[in-house]
Image (cartoon, helix red, strand yellow):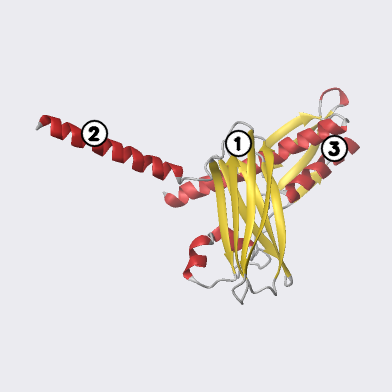
């Protein structure tokens, strides 16, 4: 009797471990987040693929960005883009994009998959276009649905987003601002707080750059005129800005859950 109970207990533990592993294997976007963003105007939609490194180490990765299309006659086609890339810690990178005419009535599934070099799937995102079925309601996440409506102000007021102010005094300071703002717009950060690039006097007539989000300094450094140094600091500032707004969003989600 004891032996039978022991066997049953062992089988139960085994089944639980398989079930747990299966569930864990289905959790994506925790280390590397895959994201599809949709923007556009009255004529075209721009569908872009992004990846964000949430870990504290650099990651060597590859992505597959696919558009599955079914036209009104039922003809099917597939357009696939793939490549290898590296993400630094806290970096958000635009991987690929495609433009779709708003006149195209084909049903489309846009799929982004991000793998590590061991072919382990770390991040995925999926969007369905031109489909009013229940499937679309399931796969379209609220943040993606909002992306296509960013151009419209809310009925109860207008929220100012994506503002970056310059307060520099020297040419290297101005060059840093230009590099930083290029990265800010390239990664479509669109932060809910005003970012200020401020240059202040420091020791021995040197100047120092402060990057502030709201009233909080996220990066400061002494100015050097070398282009490589300025570009490197701008890249670091962009990564810290992305991390700041992601942490801000996480804190909002925690408050909502509470």
Picture coordinates of residue 113 (x, y %)?
59, 49
Which numbered tag is attached to residue 173? 3
Residue 78 in which image quadrant: bottom right
Q: Is residue 13 left or right of residue 59?
A: left
Q: Nearer the viewer, residue 249 or 53?
A: 53
Q: Nearer the viewer, residue 195 or 188?
A: 188
Picture coordinates of residue 184 (x, y %)?
73, 47
Disc 1 is placed on an element classified as: loop
Q: Residues within 10 Å of mark 2 (few under 14, many from 20)?
A: few
Picture coordinates of residue 107 (x, y %)?
60, 70
Q: Give the Cα separation between the discs numbered 3 and 1.
A: 39 Å
Picture coordinates of residue 208 (x, y %)?
80, 31
Q: Nearer the viewer, residue 180 or 108?
A: 108
Q: Which residue is mark 1?
A: 117
Relative to 47, does residue 131 appear above or below in the rendering? below
Tell me which numbered mark, 3 or 2, is placed earlier along the sequence.
Answer: 2
Q: Which residue is mark 2?
A: 10
Relative to 106, does residue 84 appear above or below in the rendering? above
Q: Nearer the viewer, mark 3 or mark 2?
A: 2
In the rendered view of the protein, which quadrant contains the N terminus?
A: top left
Relative to 180, does residue 203 appear above or below in the rendering? above
State yes or no: discs 3 and 2 in contact (Cβ < 8 Å).
no
Q: Residues within 10 Å of mark 3 (few under 14, many from 20)?
A: many
Disc 3 is placed on an element classified as: helix
């Amino acid at each position: 009797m004891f032996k039978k109970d022991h066997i049953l207990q062992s089988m139960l533990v085994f089944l639980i471990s398989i079930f747990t592993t299966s569930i864990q294997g289905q959790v994506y976007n925790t280390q590397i987040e895959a994201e599809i963003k949709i923007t556009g105007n009255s004529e075209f939609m721009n569908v872009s693929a992004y990846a964000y490194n949430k870990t504290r180490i650099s990651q060597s990765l590859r992505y597959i960005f696919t558009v599955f299309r079914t036209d009104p006659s039922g003809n099917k086609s597939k357009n696939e883009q793939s490549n290898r890339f590296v993400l630094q810690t806290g970096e958000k990178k635009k991987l690929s994009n495609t433009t779709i005419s708003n006149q195209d009535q084909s049903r489309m599934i846009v799929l982004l998959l991000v793998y590590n070099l061991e072919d382990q799937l770390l991040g995925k995102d999926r969007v369905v276009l031109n489909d009013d079925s229940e499937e679309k309601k399931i796969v379209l996440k609220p943040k993606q649905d909002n992306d296509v409506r960013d151009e419209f102000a809310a009925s109860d007021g207008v929220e100012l987003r994506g503002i970056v102010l310059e307060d520099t005094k020297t040419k290297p300071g101005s060059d840093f601002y230009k590099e930083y703002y290029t990265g800010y717009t390239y990664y479509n950060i669109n932060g809910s707080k005003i970012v200020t690039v401020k240059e202040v006097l420091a020791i021995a007539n040197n100047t120092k750059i402060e990057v502030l989000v709201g009233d909080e300094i996220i990066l400061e450094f002494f100015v050097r005129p070398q282009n490589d140094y300025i570009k490197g600091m701008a890249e670091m500032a962009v990564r810290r800005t992305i991390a700041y707004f992601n942490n801000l969003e996480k804190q909002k989600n925690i408050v909502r859950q509470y």
